[in-house]
Structures are given as C-alpha cells and as structure tokens.
Amino acid sequence: MKYLWWLLQIERLWILTNLRSFRLAVPSTCFISWTKISPRRWRSKSPYTLAELIDNSLWATSKNTEMKTIEIRMLFDESLGKAAIIALDNGCGMTSQKLKEWAVYRCSKFNRASEKYVRPDPAPRSLNSDISYFGVGGKQAIFYIGDSVRMITKPVGCPDVHELILSKEDFKRKEQNKEDIYKSVIKNRKPGDPSHVIKDDERFLHSLIAEEPGKESFTAVVITGIRPEHITFLKQHFKVLTRQLAHTYHYYIHGLNGNDPSSSFTNSDHSKIDIQVTLREKPLKLPHVVNLREIDDDMQTLYIKAAADTFEFKAATGIDTGRVEGIIRYHPFLYDKETYPEGPEVAEAPRDEEDEMKARGKRPIFECFWNGRLIPYTTVQEFDWCAWKGAKGAKVPEDCYGRFSGVLFTDDKFQVTTNKLTFMDLEQKVKGRETIFTRVVNGQEQRTHIQTQFTQWLKNCHENLDKQVKFLSFGKFVTRPDMTPKKMQHPWATFSAIEWDGKIYKTGQLVKSQKTQPIIHGTVVQFLLYGDHDRDVFATGGQVEVRLEPKSLYNKNKIIPIFRIDKNATDEGIKKNIENDLGRLPHELKVIWQEPNGWPQNGFCPAGTPLGPLSVEIMNKKGEVMSRMPATSQGTVIRLSVKLTVLKNGPEKAEEVLSLVALHSARWGFGFKKIERLNDPGSYTLSLNTLLHDTSATVFGGRDLPSSKISFTITAGTAEAFVLGEMSSTLHVGVPFDIPLQITDGYGNSTKPLPSLLPELECRGLEVSFAAVDCSGSKFIIKGVKARGKLLNNQPVKKYDLRVTLTGLKNPTQTIKISLLPGTPHTLHVKTDDNPIVVQNGTAARFNVEVHDEAGNVTTHPRQIVHCQVPGLTPTTVDYSRTGAGQLVTKPINLKIVRGEPQKLRVQFEMPSRRNVESVVRELTVIPSTRVSQIMVCSQNDESLVLRSDEKIEWLAGGSLDNLFYKLHDEAGRVVPITTEIASMIKVNWTNQVDLKDLVLGKLPIAQVPTQVQEERFYQVSYQDQSVTVSFSIVPRPDEPAKLKTTLLNDTVKLGETLSGNINLELVDKYDNATRTLTATCVNDLNVKAEGLDKEAVTFKWRESSRSVDVTGICFHRGTPGIKNLLFTYQTYTTYQIVNVAAGDPAMLKLVGGPSQPLQVINDHSIPTPFLIQLVDEWGNVSTDKRVVVVMKSSPSELKVSSAVVSQPVDSEGKASFTVNSVSGQRGCYQLDFNGSLNNKLIPGPTVNLTVLPNPNKPVCLTVEYSTAARFPAGGTFPVFSVTVVSDEGSPMTTFNPAAVTMLLWEGEASNRRPPQTPTELKCSKPMENERKDCFHFRDKKIPETAGNHTVQFSLLIDQTNFLLSDQIPINVVANQPVKLAPESQPPAPVVSCCRDVKNRTLVQDMTLRIMDSYGNPAGKDLDGKLVVSITNCSGDGAKPTPLFDGRINRYEISLAEGQVHFTRLAIMENSPGEDGSEYTLRFQPDVPQVPTPLAPFELTFHFYDDAVNQQRVCDLLKKKESLSSAVSVLKQLFDGYSELLNLFTVQRETASIKVADQREVLKRQNVTVTESIPAIDRLLTEKTKEADGIRTAAKRVCSIRDDFRGQQDVLGMVGHLAYVQDDAAARVISWQISGDMDCVVTGTTEAARRIYDDTRGRQQVMALDSVLVPQMNRPLPHIRNGRSLFEPRGNPVFARDLLIFPRDEENCAIVFANFLSDTILMDDLDSANDYRRALVQKKIRCPTILTRQGDRISARGKFGGTQNRCPPITSLKVFGAPLPQHFYTLQEQIDLLRQYRTAVEKKEKAEKDRDDHSNKMKSPVMIKKQQDKETKEKQLEEIERQLNSTTMGPQRRMKRGLEDAAGPLDSIAKRAK
C-alpha cells in the first residue's frame, strides 16, 4: 500500500521508445518506459475529478464538425464484471505517439512533440474548448478514482485501435520481481476484436469493443479498481454529481446565453456538444441515464431563469493580460418574497437578523469561469461600483443590492491551479487599479462611467421589476394622452382593487389625499399600472384615478400616485365634508309674470295669443338668490343663465319652436320680453332651465341644475279660406273624378267649414257637372265631377281652366289647370267603299276600323283589340291600343267554287275585352279566280285515252309510255293557255330531265315501266305554284323465259352436315321475273354436280303453288372448307349456286404461337410473348365457332397467374390470345393448361411447362430484430428495432426509400394481421456508422406513457396501393419509476365548515391514493410504507389558526400497502379552529423506504368557513366555477387547436411553395420550363415519356445470348449480359476476345454454381466469385511508371475492361472482367499496336494482349495474323449490347424531376385548399357562436371569481377561530359571525 500511495504522486513520465502507426494484419504490441515521479498532492471531490476526464474529451472533440459526443459510464453492475468508470468520446483519438505523450506527467500541450500548440482564436465567453491544459489532471483523476486504467483509442485515418494499460498492481509486481517498473506495452488490434480480453471480471469490455466498428475515431478511458467510498458516493449522490457537472459545463452545453429559452441567440457549435452520464447498478434496476443538457436545476440555470434583467460589462486589466467578460443578473422582489434562487448545493454563510431580509445574504456575487469552464472554489465578492455605499444619497434601497448574481468569464491568460479548482491571480488583477470597466449594450462597449450606468440600471430594475403593491381584478387597457413622453401613454392596465400595506382599496371607495394642494376628497374610479398586465400583479407603485366629491360641485377626476392616499382618513370625516359643499349648489327656480294673469298650467289659447313678459330667480337650499356657482378654486368664476324654450309636442319627439337665453341683470334678474309667434295649433311645453353660461351645460358634477316646466295648448281659428287638394291634372272624357278642398283659418290652419256651403264649377269649352259634396271635419270634397267635349285628333293636348267657388268665405275662389283626353271605348266604326264588298277567290279583304269614345273621339286604351271573323277562316286580330284606328286585312279567302258561281259571306267585327262596345257586321261577295285548278293527261295517239287520277295501268315489264300530253283549266272550267312561265311550273316525278319546249307544247316526258313484276310505280304530274296534281300507277307484267334461277336462303353448310335449307329452281325472264312456265315433269330433266357432293342424297321436288322445283339433301363429305359451286342444268338452261362450306364441329385446340421453350419466368414478372391458341375440327381445319370459350389455368393452383382475361371466346379467326401480365409463386416447375368448352362439352387443348425463378426485387416479408429481454417502462425509449425487407430469393433488400418503412404503434393486444384505422406512425432513423446497412433501424422511439398492452407492427409501402406488414409484436408497457402519490381521479376542491353535520365537515370521501409514476400509471404494487396527512396554511402565515381533524389531532399516520391507501371519510373536528373564508392545503406525504428518491406528496386545497350557509354558497359557486372552467378550457383548447392547425396549414403551404420554387429552379437548370398548371405538366410529361420510350424501343445492339439463370439466388448473370459497350468496333473485338466466355454464368457462391451445373447436367459453364482471385485493377498502362509516361504512344491505348459499362453490381462485374480480360489493351490499328509492343519490349516491360478496333489481335507472346487472330464480322458474333444514349438518362432525370414537381404542385394546391377551407371553417357561424359562448362563459367565470373574492376576502369575513374557541357552542359561533 505504501508503494501505491507513492505511485499516486506522479510528477513526470516520459516515453523512451519511438513507434509509428502502420497497418496490422494481426494484433501486435510495443513497449514503453517511464521514470520515477516526485510526489505531489491532489485533492478534489468526485464531480470535479470526473470533470478532468470531460475536459480532455472536450479538447479531443473540439474540431468535430458533427455532434460532439461525450459519455461517462459508471458500471457498478456485478453481473457485468468488476466496477468500472468509462469516459468515452468521439474525438480525434490518439496515435501511438500521442498516447505515449499522454502517459508523460506534466507533458502539457505546449511541449508535446507530436504537434505544435496553436492558440485558438478569441471566442465569446472564451468558449474555445481549450481546457485540457497541463498534462496532469487526467492522470491524477484516474488514480484518485481507481487503481488501473485502460486507454483505448483510434485516431482518424488509422485502421487500428491502440490500447495502453497502467495499474498499481502491475507496478508493485514489477518492483517485487526486480523488473523494469517503468516499462509497459501499447497493444494494436483491429476494431471490434475482443480476443485479448480473457478475464471474467472484465467481460463488460466486450460490449464496449463491439461498438468500435464503423467509428472513424474515438477514445475510451476505462478506470477499474474503483474505491468503495467513490462507488458509494456516486450511487447515492448521482443527482448531485450530474447537477454539479451541468453547472461546470453550463455554457458549453447551452451556448453563450446559457439555458435561457427566451434567448434569440443560438450557437450551433455549442448546441452540438452532448454530454451524457450513465449509472448501471444491480441487474434488475433500471440504469440512470442523464443528458446534462436536460438538467434544469443547476445553479446557472436557476440564476438565468430567475433573472428579470441583465447588466453586461467587460474588464480590461492591461495589454495582453487577458480578457474578462461579466454579467450581473437582477432577481426582483415578487409576490411577497425574494426570487434570488436558493440552490441545493449553494454554501451559504450564516445570516444574522440584520442580514435576514437580504436575498443573497453574504454570498459572493460572481462565479468565475475559465475558458468557459467553472472554477468552483474561486468567487469574487463584489466590485466597488456595484457595492452598497450607504443610505446617504442612495437612489435605491439597500435590499436591491442583495438581489443580483453575477458571472465572470476569463481566458487562459489568467492562471488556475493544475486541478482547475481555484484561480491563482484573478481577483488581484481584476480589482487592480489599472483595470478599466466598460458596460456592454447590444454587443457594443460604452465608454461611460460604470458606476453611474450600474446605479441607473439598478434603479430601473427596482422601479420596474420589484412588485410590492398587489393590483387585483384587471379591467382593461387604456391610453393616457396626458402622459409624456408619448411612449408612456400606452399601455396602462386598469384594476378595480389593490392590496397595500395589509389593507384593500376598491373601486367606489371614498378616499382622502395627503400632501396635495388642495386636499381632495373623492371616490376611487380605478387603479392604473403602466405595462402589459392582464391579471393580478405585484408592483412597486402605481396611480389612482379619483372622482372629486361632491361631483355636482367639482365635476372632474384627478389622478394621483397611490402613496398620496391618506391611509388614516375615515369615511365619516370624508362624508361630512362632502355634505357641507352640497348646500351651496342651486336648488330651485322662481317664475314671476309681469302681466296680471300669467299663463295657467295646462291652459288653452287660440292661435296668435302672445306669451309673456316674465322674469326668473335661481335659489339654493338656504333660500339665497344666486347668479353664479360657488367658487371651487382660486380665480375660477362660473356664471349662470336661464334658458327659455318653447317646445311643440309631437307623437315621436318634441319640436323646438323658439329658444331664448337670459343673463342676469341687477334690475330684472333673468327677464324675457313678450312673445307673439305661437300660431300653430297643438300641445306646447314652456321649459325654464338653469345653464352654466360658458358651456351651456344643464348638468354640473353629474347633478341636474334646477328647472321648471309649464304645459299649454294652442287651438285653430274660424274658417276664412280653402285650399285645393291634390288631384290628377289629366282627365278623360266622361270619366268621373273628385275635387278635394281643405278649409283653413287666417293662419292656414285647418278648421271646420261653415254650414250650407255649395260649390260652383266653370270651364270654358267644356261641359262640367258634379254629382254631390262630402263634408267631414276640415275636408270638403266635390264628388262625381264629369267633363265632356269634342277633341281635335293629332293635336297637342289642350289646357283648360277649371274655376271652383265657395260662397261665404273671405277668399271664395280657386282655379286649377286640367287636361282632357279621349275617354274609354264606346263604339266601333267600320268604313267600306262598297256594300257588299267584292273580292276574288284566293285574295284577302281590307277594312278601315276606328274606335270612338262616347263623344265620338278616336280613343286609345290598353287591351283595345278588334277581332274580325270571316266564315271558314280563323279570326283576324288587330291591336288598336296605341293608334285607335287603322286598316284590318283578313287572311286569303279560299272557297270551293261550284260551277263558277260567286258566294256571299257575313263578316263580324267585335272587341271581346270591351263588353259595352257592340259588334258590327259587313257583307262580302267571293267570285271565281282565273288561276289553274285542274290538270288533264292524255295520249296523242289516242286522244280519247285520258288518264284519270289514281288510275292503275298494266304494262309490259321494262317497256315505256310515249306521247303523253297535258291540259290546264281554271276555276270556271276555262282552258288556260300554256305559257313559258306556266310550263316552268309543271313537274313530273319519274324524271328530272324535262324539256321546257315540250312542256310549252303540252308534251310530257316518256314514262319508263319497272323491270320487276312486283314493283308497282306511282306517276304524278303537278302544277307546283297552285299545288294542282294528277297521278296514276303502272303495274308491270313478266316477259318470255330467258334463264334458270336458283334461290337459297342459307348458303353455309359444315363438312359432314346436310344443308339446312332448300334450293328453289324456276324459269325467269331477262329481268329475273318468274314466268311460271315449268311443269311437273321437269324434275326428270334436272341435274346437279359439285366437288365432294354426295349426289345420292340429292332429291328434286315439284312445288305446284309457285310452279318451281325444290332441291334437298345437299351434303359434302370431303375436301377443304371454302366456296363450292353447284351446277344445275335443265334442257338448255344452266345456272350455278354458290355454297360456303365451313369447317366441322370444333374438336381440339392447338398452340400456334407463344414464347420459346423451355419457358422460365422470374417471380412477379410477365411473359411478354402472348400464347396464341387455334380452334380446329377433326380434320385439322380452322374452326371459327365463337361459342367456344378457351380457359387458361395454372397447375398446381399455388401458381398465381395474372392476365387481362383467363377465359375468352375465340375470335372471328378461331383464335384466342392470352397475355400473362404476372406470374407469382414459389420457385419450381408449373404448367399452364389451355382447354375449351362448347355447350358444357370439353375441348382438349395444349399444356405449357414453365419454371418460376425467384425474384430478387420482390419483397415477401419483414423480419424484425430487437432485444426481446428489454423492458418497456412508460415514457421511456424503445430498444432499437432493426427491420429487414426480405426478397423472394431470401436476401435483404435495400432499394426502398426509408420513408416507405413505418413503425405502427397502438394500444391494445394484437388481433388480426392488419392494424387498426388510426395507429401512431413513426418513421425510421438514419443508420449509424456501426449499424447494418441492409436493414432499417427505428431508434430512440418513445414508449407510450400509458401502461398496459400495446402492439407494434411494421409496414412497408411498396407502391401507392400495395403494402407489406410484419408480424404483430405485443408490447407490455410497465409503469416507470414511482415519483408521486396521486388519486385515481382528481377530486373537487372541498368546502368545509366547523358545524355539527359531518357532511359539511368532510374533506374527502371514498378516495383512493396510489403511488404513480410521472405519467399517472400505478407504480407501487410492491411498495409498502406509511402516509402522513396534515393541514397547512396556503399563505405560509404561521400565526393563522389551522383546522384540526376529528379527535383534535393535526396529523394522521396511515399504513400504505401495495402502493395504495383508501380513505372512506376524512373530516375536520366539530368547532374546529381556522380562519373564516381562508384556503388551506390538505397534504398527503408518503414515506416509502424502498424508494431512494422521496415521492412527491398529493396536495388538495380546501376552503374553510364558520357557517354552513356560506359554505354551501361557496360550494355551489365552486361547482359552477369548475363546470365553467372545464367548458372554457374545452373551448379554448378547441380554438387553440384550430389556430395551431391554421398555423400548420400555413407552414405547409409555405413549405409547399418553397418546394415548388426549388423544383422549378432545378428544372430550369435542366433547361425545362414549365408553369404551375397540372395539365401543362402532364402534357410535358407525356412528351418527355414518349420521347424516352422512343429512344428505349429504338433499334440498338443487343446481346443475343439467352440468359435463363438471371434472378436466381446468388446468380450474378451471364457474362454477355453483365456489361455494355458503347462503340461498335470495341464491342465487336472485345466480344470476340472472350467469345468462349460470353455464355458463362457467374454466381456469387460455389454452391449456386454447383446447383446450375447439376440442373444442366454439366452443359452450362459457370464461374463462382468466391473461388476467384481478385486481381489488382488500379495499375496504370504498361508505358506509365510512377505516374510518368516512358514514351508517347500513338493509337490511343486503353485497357479493354475500362470500356465496359456495368448496369448493376459494378464491383463484382469489375472482378469478373478483370479475370476474363486481364490487362488486355485496345488500340486504333495494327501498326500502332506493333509500335507500342516494340517500345515496351525494348524497355523490358511485359506487354499484354493487344486488340485493335480494325479487328486484329497481337497476343501476349507477340503473335498476330491468320484467321485465328482476325475478328469475324459482327453479324456472326454474339456481342455485348449497347447502352442507352446519354440523352435517354437526361430525359429520365427530367421525367423524375417533373413528377416530383407535379407532386409538389399538387401538395401546394392541396395545402392552399386545406388552409382556405380551414380558415372559412374558423369564420363559420358555428365557430363564431362558439366564440361568443366562450366569451359569455368567461364573463360568468369572472363574476363567480368576484363573488368568491367578495365572500372569501371581505373584511367582515376575516374572522379567526382559535383553539380556545373550538369548544364553544354553535349558536355562539353564529352570533359572532353576525
């Protein structure tokens, strides 16, 4: 042990050997030596010991561009081996040289030989990671903690891992054995190789070493032999350890501004530092894993979060002597307490009574950080400029100097001890005289006096941040224009109450000011506080708005500071002062009339009666006459005046008639003169009002000034005149109208008429009369007035003067202008020249018609329609509504004239719409016309032959009728001469070729007779103008026999069958008309013959009815299908009958087309060549029977065949085509059977054999790997799930996008294979360097927070419609660590009283409390303990009495079994002490020894009252409040959710717009211009796709070798298909060079090669890659040595293998062709090749085989020429295929980009639509109604809060019940409460 202590005091260590890194094939070792060390003592606590290791890691990771990961693992799990502490980082690692330098004590970074130290650039807060400094701390920390260390490191770029082991035990052993103590070894090994770890107690190293593969660099410090005291400390104080480490590296973890969520500054470098501490104890105990970034209770975090404002400064201590940055944070006084943080590990000095109220106490202000790292044992108490200087001249209280904390940041120019626990010179330098302090604002230094700046800042903090007055019941925000500057005008928050110095002031309360001029008395209007405060808040001060009282005297408000309120004033004194001021105000008016009789109240006066004169006096309550208001301030005089107003009262509002204002005079007071303007009858009011003369206001201080009112009525006078009422000035003849008159008095007011008034009417030129008069009130109406007279037509309307006279009035006569128009229709007038009227048949009759009124004037009126009815014709209607007269023309009259005699008609005229107008009748005579009315057709050869109309004529078929003539006659029977005009109107229907000259002569065209007997033809001659026609029909008759005719209805017959129909034979004429000349004996002379015809079956039968012969029994038994000619003969007549002989009945199916055999298909692939099936009969003839249905089936049925059709009838050619789109099945041999059916009869068909090969591109299942032993604590992290997509051939697939693989998670047990509708979807993580690349990893996925059964399933989206699911994995989520005690459901806040009824005293009833984790899951099933129940004051006031439980006890102790406890009832005692209306907390504190961390208690707040009535009222209010709060919360969550969703839609829209813009820019770079129109994108996609398809399908060079093995497991493919060659000449010669290997099949394994060999019985040559030596493929051409050409060759030499293009599996294909082609060179021609070979040989360099593009070959031995060295033509070779041109791939890229762009545009449109729809939904009436409902409920909630406050906080409720009162009776309690 003595030696071990000596070893710990290491001073110096160095390396004696020199090693260099090199690549190792096997592990190796090297030796190092060191020297004895001088002693040095080092002390540190465990957190700061581990900090030394973190310092080294921070320096090692300082140059990382990605995340800097540092992990401290404390492994105290005996199942893993002995205790160990591991410091692991992903830094740069150490080479062997650096590892040797690390072992040297005090080998600091300044004197290391491996690299020269470069000081980092200055950084803000000196956060430069340059804290691994002296070469001492790490080694001291290691041997302080344990006895042995294993350094494991891998530097960047080195393939090997270096290990160095140092241990005290090894040192002691070497000393005892007299060995070289200071010599050890560095072991070099491969990453992930644990073979050297053989000790069982070091088995934890296996998992550490297993993490090494894939890491570019790392360092792991493994410390073992941990001292027991360290293990105990680290286990028990793990939280303390992590909190101190988080404090030490706070600014490295959180950045420049620390853990401040509100800070807008971010530092990406520091946000990449991830420090994690892990503690593993016993196996069943969950490991503790803490990321220092997640700790939120370290001291710096507490300081930052509690700070309300900061003061930044810098200190310059001299030139190049270091930089100091400082921050002071102010922690204000809030809510009756200090906010200066009290951290768990803060060491406070003892406080005396004087120092008790200071927040910081005697703790120093500044903590000190060196290069961003905490130096824990150095602090700075204060600086002179920020210290308290005494009360004299102080701008802020002394307490403010105890409310701030601070931080100092220094660089490494200031010295620290080697253990980095203390500064050596910081305080001396910073507090030196040379130090200059400057304030920093927004990053800029301000050269001002630091103490002045700090004092002003501290004053602002005190005034704006310290909250000492509590403002209650927020009202609204207001703007105060009276404030200056303008920035202080808004916002001002208003409140209805304040709590100040223990007293509450409310709105409406009377207050008195102090120390104001003058002293004011008034009522509180509101309290004002500057700032955005919308709830109860504490502040240092504020203002109060006071309404001066009495308001009627002062009438203004005044705002004063709150501290000006006189807290000693009483309500009685204030009210007495107000009452004294009220007696000086005006009280009443006194009216004095100057005339003997004044106007009485409610009197009546006729119009024109004068008012006045009068005077008014103003009196106060004391009876004193006043002319001005009492004075309220010096120099202010308010004069009074009296306003006289006369108002006429109306139904809706009063109308002001006159208004006068009188000032006060010494003689008359307030006087008014006589008024004579009241002439309008009605109800009036005389108002006298007192006014403030300057403002004319009738109200002063909210109080009405005195006034007086007198009501009276003005009536109308006697009748003196009249006024004509409104009437139309346009009148009609004979139409009666009324004249209204209004009788008035002398002022124009309506009045009653005089009795016996009679009117007189006069109008020159017209006759005027009236019927009667009507007198009603003041109305006088002359009724039934009529005017008559003759008016001039077509002249302007004439005006007439109509005089109205009423005898007996002063003004008896009035005149009115009128216009007279024709009256209503009265008679019809029809004018005719002759009677009767004569018209020719076929013409129209004309009549002149007029409509007259009763005076004979032509009149016009609406619906003035005249009907004219001519017998036999429809009525003629004419509208005379506008003209009144006009000509009426009837329709043409067409009568049938008999023998040319005229006919007479009666024409009637009438107006159906005017029943009062009589109809008129006129006579009409119709005479015959001269128009053509008859046509006669006759023959010139026989003039007596006249063809009658509709006559039938029999004529020889095919003949004609010649010499036909026609004649025309009129209606009188006279012959009408034929003129050219008339002839042109003659039409015939049998020809269009008509000669006009013949028609003029009366001759008709020749009429041809039909050739067929059955065809009867119709002939017609017509005169088109008059529609006069004559028609006849000709019936043809047959001619003499000319030939033999056959008739056959069905001309098709199958081979072997008899023709179904009969063949009919008859003799016909030359037009095929039956002559019916055959006889019954003709059957003996008939004969028939044809090829293959069975003549014996033919029979001839006589048919008497048609005199023809029927032939039956036609049958063919041989020959081929097709057309057959039957030859019939009879005497000299012969004829042929064509018969179509079809194939026989379908008998079998044949395969006439399809893919070549043997057929091999890759699984899920198509068979591009269709199967063509032919239907044949038994003779092998093609059958076209479409009734036959062909069916394709697979055998066995496990093979799934996808085709457009699996069954179909044959087509018109008897064929059926089947295209197989997809073949799915397991690997093996199958059959495709083709069979037909006809009427349920089977037709046999062919069978095709096929072999299904596995598809390497088809996913068939998902395999999931994860730790099945893992636990799933609620809220924790799932283990890593590795999901492998397995292909059809059993290999992993990596071609899918990671976004296509999804982890589905839902609550509940696994059921069927498919997940529920809405599972939680989780995306896969990026693979880490050391993870498999052939699977998808789901890492760091959060476990559900609800304990119970859950299910995990993984899904692969194959395409838009198909997906693949894994097996469902049941997950049992268990509760996490127990953290709290909570009920199963939150009970409502109880309200209790100290009455006798136990129900009113019950706190909880039927409540079960359980131990739960942080997510509310029961977590205490195996935990027992006790539960302490107590009652505490919410306010913390120790003087306030506390209620007691039943039994007069203040706490309960109850057993806690299996993590739960049940309360049947818990109540307070009867007459319990307590403060009425106060709130208390019912605290349930669990004590469970098995849980290392104390559990959080459950606390329930309750209200205490003295009386049950008030308790019940508050209880009801609380229930209603809870209900309203729940409803408001739901609505608020709804609106918040809608707002968040709107923001989400907005973000989605913006993201989609950015995506569209980015995609458009990418397309522009590809020279593709497109708009955001989906149709335009589709058109461009179609064009590009068509162009690409054209290139793909264009003729190009292809390899003609058939590859039947591609796609099989472990098969790469056939050599000829593994590569493309662009150049034709190169493809030809290279293919020829390896022509014997072109059909070789390359496999990945020998087993696969052997399988193919066995399947083909050795016929197929194969090559396995695992048996091929990989040649060196990066060598240059032979003429290049050491990167330089030995000579300049011609002919462009190039390795032949470099011309190959590999479409897939490039690495393996390169190995294949490197073996086949080796170093074969390709050149342009033979001469260049010979020159190249000669030059190489001369330089004694081996020359490989050379090929030329011309087709020559020079072997490696130099041989060329001959047929064996000459390449044949390309057409005779099996050559490599040609790749698609580059333009094709450009098009493919453009197509992919266009598809992405189209998707982006669709997403953008959808996002815009979703956002618009959601926005409209938010504005919908339903949502508006819900918003209104929410506001209503919030107002109700505020009202309940007010009622609760008034109930619980009113002064009258603040009664205390002490313990001594508890024994009193209930009635005494009730009395005291009153």
Image (spheres, helix red, strand yellow):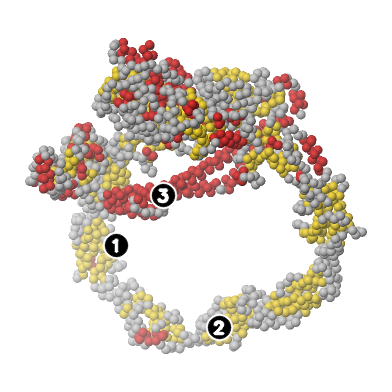
Q: Is residue 629 above or below residue 1742?
A: below
Closest to the observer, 512 or 1213: 512
Identify the amino acid type marked 2. Answer: Ala
The residue nearer to you, when weighing 285 against 485, is: 485
**Tag nearer the camera, 2 or 3:** 3
Give the vertical position of 489 relative to 905 (above or below).
above
Residue located beneath label 1 in the image: 1049
Q: Under tag 3, what secondary structure?
A: helix
Which mark is nearer the camera, 1 or 3? Answer: 3
Residue at point 53%, 24% (across, down): 346
Nearer the N terminus, badge 2 or badge 3? 2
Disc 2 crowd, CA 10 A, few/some/many (<14, 14-19, 20+): some
Q: CA distance from mark 2 to mark 3?
A: 83 Å
Label 1: state its secondary structure: loop
Check the image and name the residue furthest to the left. Answer: 1762
Looking at the rendered image, the disc whose residue lies closer to the viewer, 2 or 1, is: 2
Circle 3: residue type? Ala
Q: Is residue 384 left or right of residue 373?
A: right
What residue does disc 2 label?
Answer: 845
Q: Residue at x 58, y 25 (%)?
A: 361
Q: Quadrant of residue 847?
A: bottom right
Q: Earlier in the sequence, mark 2 or mark 1?
A: 2
Q: Earlier in the sequence, mark 1 or mark 3?
A: 1
Q: Nearer the viewer, residue 66 or 408?
A: 408
Q: To which quarter of the image does residue 64 belong?
A: top left
